[in-house]
Amino acid sequence: MSDIQPLVIAIDVGGTFTDVILVDGESGRRWIAKTPSTPSDQSIGFFTGLEKVTGQAHIDSALIRRVFHGSTVATNAILEGKGARTGMLVTDGFKYVLEIGRHDVPRKENLYTWIKPARPVPPRRIREVPERVLLDGSIERSLDAVATCAAIEELKKMGVESVAVVFLHSYANAVNEKAAAALLAEHFPEAHVSISSEVLPVFREFERAMVTVLNAFIHPQVSRYIGGLSAGLKQRSIDAPLLIMKSNGGVFGPRQATNQAINMALSGPAAGVIGAGVVAKSSGHLNAITIDIGGTSADVSLIRAGQPAMTNESEIGPFPIQIPTIDIHTIGAGGGSLATVSDYGVLTVGPQSAGADPGPACYGKGGKHPTVTDANLVLGRIPEYLLGGEVELDREQAQRAIVKYVADPLGMDLYEAAAGILDIVNNNMVGALKVVSVEKGYDPSEFALIAFGGAGPMHASELSRLLGTKTVVIPALPGILCAVGLLATDLQYDYVRTCLQRAPEYDLELMRRVFGELLTLAQQGLNEEGVPEAQRRLDRLADVRYAKQGYEITVQLPMGDVNAESVSLLVEDFHQRHEQLYTFCDREAAVEIVNLRIKATGIVDKLELSTVDSCNGTDAKSRSTREVFFSDRGFQTAPVYAREDLLAGHALKGPAIIDQLDTTTVVFPREIARVDAQGAIFIEIDHE
Amino acid sequence: MNSPEKTLDPVTVELIKGALQSARSEMEALIDRTSMSPFIREKKDYFSAIFDRQGRLISGTRVPLAGNLIDCILEQYPQDDMRDGDLYIYNDPYWSKGAVSHLPDMVFVAPVFARSELMGFAEAWGHLWDIGGLMPGSISPDATETFHEGILVPPTRIYRAGQFNEEVMRMFLRNSRFPEMVKGDLKAIMASCQLGKRRLEEIAERFGLEALDAAFEEMLEQTAFSLRTALNEKVPDGRYRFSDCLDGDGHNDQDYAVSLTMEKLGEDISLDFTESTNQAKGAINFKMDKSVPANMLGLLLTGEDTSVQMNAGFERALKSVKLREGSIVDPVYPAAVGMRSHTMVRVTGSLLGVLGRATDGQISAASPVYVLYYLRSHDRLRGSYELCIEGLGVGFGARTFADGIDAVYFVAQKNYPVEFAEMEFGVRIEAYRIHKDSGGPGAYRGGAGIIRDVRVIGDEAVLGLRLDNVKHPAWGIKGGHAGRPGRVIVNPGAEDERQLRPMSDQNQLRKGDLLRIMTSGGGGWGHPFARPEASVRLDVLDGFISSESALTDYGVSLTRDFDIDVEATRTIRAGVCSDGDMFNHGEGITSKEGLLN
């Protein structure tokens, strides 16, 4: 993978648009295309985009040497409950593992009105089989093959396409699960099989079962989808590796993506964070909080020392999904968020959204209720058109909606009401920004705020002021940062196994063995993708906690021998990390090692980001002016710049507006915006 | 109804509301991540709240518990004696007049100052693993005085102007069988209050005290308004009575009733609990703060409106709440209170009952109280204890719009994963199932309880049990049947099979014994014949109900292949379909069958 590959393409499928970027690694030239997403079959949009961009570039697509792809196929299958008909084999006595779950009403819900979300597999398609593994991995009862075959026959009769196998304590010994998988392969070869000891060999059976079941649930669909892409690429004579975005910020090839489809489930916003990471590095802000604001939601994440924060505890829809994932917090706040006033007179914004259809009132597509976009339009923050004029926005409609549904009921004037809508949605988004920063022990004043997505750049300054970050960074291509991020990904695999070690007796021999086994798996994975030795990186990690604590912190264990010294370094690292995250550490307390992990990376050569020309001391020229409302000053006349006119070194004094194809940046009064060599905009925030 | 005069613009109110929620979320995140005991770290028995300077709850977790957590501190420590950096703790249900309702729940309160003026309080509480008392875990059906339930801490200043009082901590921890674990939790919750304090200071800095006071008042009024509106819409003027009975207190074979009369005249609504049974000898007494029924009504009736904060505004919507000293909901010190949730659930039941009468059944059916068991062993030579406390879910009552929730405990409280329980408690869990046919049949089915099979693998253990709704199952409404009772069996199917009293302690278990706990189901709503046939069939296939119940309760006849026998079903369902009584109390298992006492 280290040979020079001039043409690389990245195709990112979003909710509304499929974004494509094609880069010539030699000349640094790039071409960008946007095409509507095709939710019923995302590959249509994929190939439309591919053809559109290669057409623009006038190149032969056969010359493409690498294809990066971010897809929401897995995510949508789960969220819409439209996966395969899935069956499940479980340990005798535990058929209701999914149904009972953790037996709680979620903390933010009302116990009198909450309805338990339907599980991906109902109990009627779950069969219990006699077998039992104990806590220490010993086999109390081997798998009953006769009963298992009978159960498999029943699942077959039910028309199941995919089967999950989840046995108790299988993380400690997978023999029984593997025996069940072998019987399934023999008697039900046409079914896909996911076993929990392969998908997520860590303790806590409900969470492990959920991930395994979801993997089985989406497998057939993801498999068909990836098969279709591969065939389509071949048809177009594109003989390049297809690299698919994972939730952990890395990519994987078609084979692994098919078997471990669950790793794609939270990949949507992950590419954007990687893209923001590229901007963070090139701009010298290695610590950054990122926010991607779209039509219905905002995705928030944190980058520290150039690395995105990771978590092992995510959720997809109502389900826990405990696989390594970039730590992204999502809230229902975006351009389409609806502003509503209750009977009493409480103004709330979101999480309900007008979506793309009917969309905000100003789209004139029948939306009657005011949204954040309507407020931005009324206040002059955004122009009266979108996509460089492709879509007209109706200011009258926006005003009417705000007056009728917000200003009048609250006795406010139009502009106060519109500004109030923005204040509230910004406040909500700051809540999310705090979840990833202050709630994790980070001081926002030591971070830059990188804002992107269609609605990010117009809210960024206000968010920064409220959060306490000192600098805002608007990437050069804020509307397609996910596609840009794809180009910067590496192959990345995580291997994990529960291996509980209680202080002070750490079983070093056992830890060596488990790490050894995980390492072998990791090397196999890298071999499968053909990663040469020189491009491999292996990291050893452990999930550690104080005895009796419920959550683990992942810390690094240097490569080399596992001995008393390396373990004591690991423990010390844990104390420090604990203090940083949770305000205290306790060096007297016993420390437990819970899970061992290997992170395997196959480094993919990176392309240089293109640069913009220097302004050579000239001033930026505005194309027009606009009246823009700012809360404490009323309407101000602001110069309007076109993003493509801005050159490296340009400095703009606020108030100013910078329009570009798919977003608008608002520079507030007293702020100065500067453009760097990569074309990113920096705004220093005045916290007075 | 016209909304009252506003003193602050709605945008600022909403901004402050959001900031308070964000502060609480940070406080809870900190407890979640740093606590030590299984009760807090896995079960998540902790909550946070923000109060104004007068001690009124402004924003709390949406649980129907007491709101007046600050009053008892202010009585002990006047406002002008409070300093920045103080922290107060207590767990005394009597001193606090029911603000805290049993001893393991330790309350932590940090007063917050803005420009040296008291502006409010950051509060959090958590259920501690053991604070002494009769048995490990501090709660026992055998307890008959609070002195059997651990150490009582009246409002006590554990930090003075930032200075930690080691002596108080030392004395307190000396009273716990698990001092290290309790210390870990105390640290986590105190850190959380201090964090909440810092956030409130920042909020005061950002908005100013005047705006804050106005916003607090506004948030209280919003909450009051929403409950008043809901009551006005749903409850016609009149006088409604309902009694909901507990099985017993583990000591007497006697019914304990929470009896409620609700009177509504225009906007005046009063609740009168004075006819409730006298207090019990056993630990089911509920020292009820008067905010509790208001909060229950609030959450019940304003559930759909997410802009409503859980706060003291709910109390404003009620004219009065009357209690009688010496009754089960207003016991006299030192009556034992460890299992007050049994009575609390019946308070909810009585509220649902009067609302059922007032609305012609347009309200949820009753839910049973959650179940706990305590498995302890004591190594006398080493002086060490092993303690396993597990909370088990039940089936909740069916709603007017949906089935009752199956296998659920409470808001925000989680079970122990089987793999975790086996790792920590020296037991083996051999089954964790749905308790078939336990949900009350109805057009909307009551939630089903669970079955948990626990094998004792240690040498011996002493078992405490608390399971209610056996004699008096959760009632059904509007044609829905009552939920079916749970029970507890040792060594089911074996020669030495025996049933245990559902509310009992000192049950001796030996190595190899299998303990089977079957929990109760919720009441159904509406006549079961009105339940769609397809739903009945799926319930059979999924194991929530049996084919027999489908036939006898729901009038749905299934073939051997579980297809619906359309003809037979139509005939049966065409037969009887009278709604009968508004409430169905079911057939509990009575003491005559030897289960209770």
Image (cartoon, coloured by chain):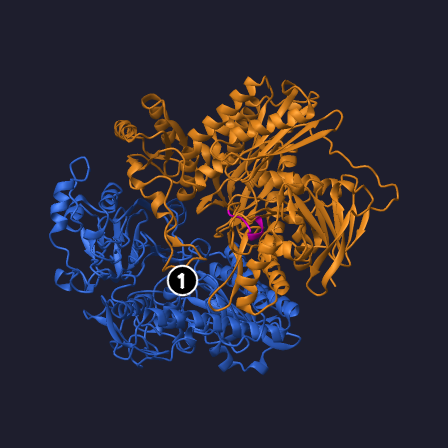
Figure check: B595 above or below B532: below
Residues B171 and B465: in front is B465
Look at 69% across and 51% down and name the residue there.
A447
Dividing the picture into quarters, in which one does residue A399 lie?
Answer: bottom right
The reply to whether the magenta stretch includes residue A360 is yes
Residue A237 drawn at (x, y percent) = 59, 17
Which residue type does callout 1 highlight?
Gly
Q: Colour of chain B?
A: blue
Residue A434 drawn at (x, y percent) = 60, 55
The reply to whether the magenta stretch includes residue B120 is no
User: Taking the image as drawn, is residue B297 in sight?
Assistant: yes
From the viewer's perspective, is A650 left or right of B276? right
Residue A353 drawn at (x, y percent) = 51, 51
Instruction: State the residue position of label 1.
Output: B303
Residues A488 and B27: in front is A488
Residue numbers of the magenta segment: A358-363
Figure check: A485 above or below A530: below
**Residue lying at the far right of the rendered structure:** A617
Q: Which chain is orange?
A: A
- Considering the image in quadrants, where does the N terminus of chain A appear? top right
User: Taking the image as drawn, is residue A585 in sight?
Assistant: no
- Considering the image in quadrants, where does the C terminus of chain A appear? bottom right
From the viewer's perspective, is B237 left or right of A300? left
Residues A391 and A142: in front is A391
Identify the secondary structure beneath mark 1. Answer: loop
